[in-house]
Image: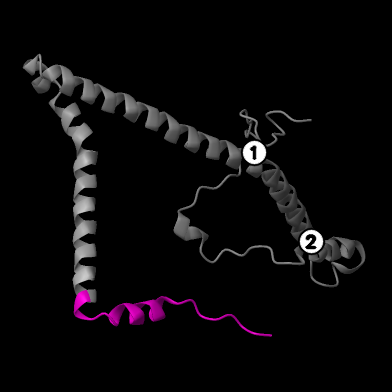
Amino acid sequence: MAGPLNPIVGEREFNGAEFDYLIDLEPSALMGLKTAQRGFARVLGEIVGNEVEWAEKAGVTAADMTHLALLNQRIARLDEYLAPVQKFAEMLSETRYVLEDRRQHIVLNIGASVERRGKEMPELLARYQKTRAYRSAAGKKAAKTRQRNAQEQEAEARALEADPDAELLDEALEAEPCGEVG
């Protein structure tokens, strides 16, 4: 049954108290860890199927089998939680982006209002100096980008005027390689 102990995708309540074995690693610590390869489920079936008659002969101890069973159980339980928790984390992140967008709109609108009303009440301009600077920063950055792009286009146009065949060479270099035939 679904619920905090058995979540499904879309739920927002999770009880992970049972996961007292969770590990928090640095991303670099994940390098080199082994993962299950194709056919692993069949390998597990073989090992478990041979446990009674052949494990001892193969040097597989009861402790190995107990530990393997515990790891299988824990991995299966983690897998039950992963999709719902990942979806929840995705929703948290997306919601934060939307809320931040709304917050930015309000702040930018306040800055615009201060600019308009500052014409009648100049003291407003000093009181909201940081807000006004913040509001205009994005516009200034966009203007610089437009100017830089225009300069790059002008430079390209001048280069083409100087050597019209250069564009043909550039296009040939950018062409996609042909796929294999056969």
Residue 128 drawn at (x, y percent): 15, 22
Residue furthest toward the bottom? 182
Disc 2 versus disc 1: distance between alpha carbons?
23 Å
Q: Is residue 178 magenta?
A: yes
- Quadrant, the N terminus: top right
Q: Mark on residue 53?
A: none
Q: Where is residue 69 in the image (x, y as percent from the top left)?
A: 77, 53
Residue position for label 1:
84
Secondary element at image label 2: helix
At label 2, counting other C-alpha atoms closer than 10 Å, the crowd grade (few under 14, some 14-19, many 20 or more) is few
- Indicate whether 181 appears above or below 111: below
Is 144 rendered above or below residue 130?
below
The disc labelled 1 sits on which kind of residue? Pro
Q: Which residue is painted at 19% across and 68% down in the image? A: 155
Instruction: Give whichever of 46, 154 is nearer the camera.
Output: 154
Neighbor class of circle 1 (other Cα within 10 Å; few <14, some 14-19, many 20+) is many
Q: Which label sits on residue 41?
A: 2
Give the residue drawn at x 43%, y 35%. Answer: 97
Query: Which quadrant of the structure image shows residue 20?
Result: top right
Q: Which of 118 and 157 is in front in this view?
A: 157
Q: What residue type is labelled 2?
A: Ala
Report the quarter where the C terminus lies: bottom right
Position of residue 157 relative to residue 76, above or below, is below
Residue 26 position, x and y percent, is: 45, 53
Image point 19% across, 50% down: which residue? 144
Q: Give the range drawn in magenta.
A: 161-182
Residues 150 and 34: in front is 150
